[in-house]
Image: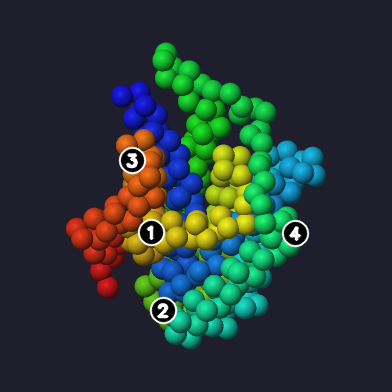
């Protein structure tokens, strides 16, 4: 039983990282109705920027603070200079442009850091384990759970308790109505896209000490992010959280029960949810 309890807690930690990865994708789609296949590239940049800062002799904590801001600025510029011009196009254009952007980022990463993965050390403060009787758990994974939980509360407050959040929620219903209220919707679009890029990069920074940084991790992350968004419900903050936790726990527990099929069970869980709730766990109809 202690093994399964460990795997459930591991699943919560993985699920919270998946939540950070997926929430930006979900919010961007909910507000912009924009299919962003370059979202995994921001996760990739987060991991590699963290790795580079560690190579420069800077500490993990600085990377945790700086990298999401830097990648958020990259996302803001990308939206402003490139993606804004294809919003009105069919979704096929969204896919072509963002897939191309993701491939460009991936190739630039390979040119800069090489085709092989690199390890990122766990910060000294979080090395070792925490023990409760016979139960042992790594300090770093416990930190990830606590940190992402606090961050989730902060994101929820931004979206539910601030003027920006009100504009985002109103814009997801009707961008025309928001424009008539005198709000610059394009500025809101840019801020939301930058926030989505920053949260994806933060997930990359937090994941780097446990899985390292490698050039193809963005593709894997994108697939998982889309599964979580579909499971939780498109455009739903709570759905991204619920979907991330569900998929994380399923993957972690199945890695003990059936290691070869752990990845497969992610998609089985998605299919089961969609059979019961076609709009996702917390998705809206229509």
Residue under label 2, please give it: 177
Between the residue at mark 4 and the residue at mark 2, the CA separation in whole angstroms equals 45 Å
Crowding at mark 3 (Cα within 10 Å: few <14, some 14-19, many 20+): few
Residue at x 44% of width, y 85% of height: 90
Q: Nearer the viewer, mark 1 or mark 4?
A: 4
Residue at x 35% of width, y 47% of height: 261
Residue under label 1, please give it: 227
Classify 174 as above or below 168.
below
Residue under label 3, please give it: 258
Q: Are marks 1 and 2 in contact (CB under 8 Å)?
A: no
- Circle 3 SS class: loop
Q: Say whether residue 95 is left or right of residue 100.
A: left
Q: Position of residue 141 (x, y in %)?
A: 51, 34
Crowding at mark 2 (Cα within 10 Å: few <14, some 14-19, many 20+): few
Seen as rendered, the residue at the extreme front is 260
Q: Position of residue 272 (x, y in %)?
A: 24, 55
Q: Quadrant of residue 139?
A: top right
Q: Earlier in the sequence, mark 4 or mark 2?
A: 4
Q: Nearer the viewer, mark 4 or mark 2?
A: 4
């Amino acid at each position: 039983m202690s093994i399964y309890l460990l795997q459930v807690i591991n699943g919560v930690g993985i699920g919270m990282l998946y939540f950070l990865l997926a929430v930006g994708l979900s919010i961007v789609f909910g507000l912009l109705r924009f299919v962003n296949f370059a979202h995994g590239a921001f996760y990739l940049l987060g991991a590699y920027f963290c790795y580079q800062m560690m190579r420069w002799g800077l500490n993990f904590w600085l990377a945790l603070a700086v990298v999401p801001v830097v990648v958020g600025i990259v996302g803001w510029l990308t939206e402003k200079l490139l993606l804004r011009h294809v919003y009105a196009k069919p979704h096929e254009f969204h896919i072509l442009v963002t897939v191309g952007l993701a491939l460009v980022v991936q190739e630039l990463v390979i040119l800069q850091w090489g085709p092989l993965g690199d390890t990122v050390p766990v910060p000294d403060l979080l090395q070792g384990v925490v023990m409760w009787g016979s139960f042992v758990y790594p300090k770093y994974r416990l930190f990830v759970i606590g940190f992402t939980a606090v961050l989730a509360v902060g994101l929820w407050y931004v979206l539910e308790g601030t003027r920006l959040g009100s504009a985002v929620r109103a814009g997801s219903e009707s961008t025309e109505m928001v424009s008539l209220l005198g709000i610059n919707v394009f500025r809101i679009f840019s801020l939301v896209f930058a926030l989505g890029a920053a949260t994806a990069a933060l997930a990359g920074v937090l994941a780097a000490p446990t899985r390292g940084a490698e050039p193809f991790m963005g593709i894997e992350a994108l697939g998982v992010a889309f599964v979580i968004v579909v499971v939780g419900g498109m455009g739903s903050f709570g759905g991204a959280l619920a979907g991330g936790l569900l998929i994380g726990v399923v993957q972690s527990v199945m890695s003990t029960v059936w290691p070869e099929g752990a990845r497969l069970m992610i998609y089985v869980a998605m299919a089961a949810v969609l059979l019961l709730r076609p709009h996702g766990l917390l998705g809206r109809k229509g």
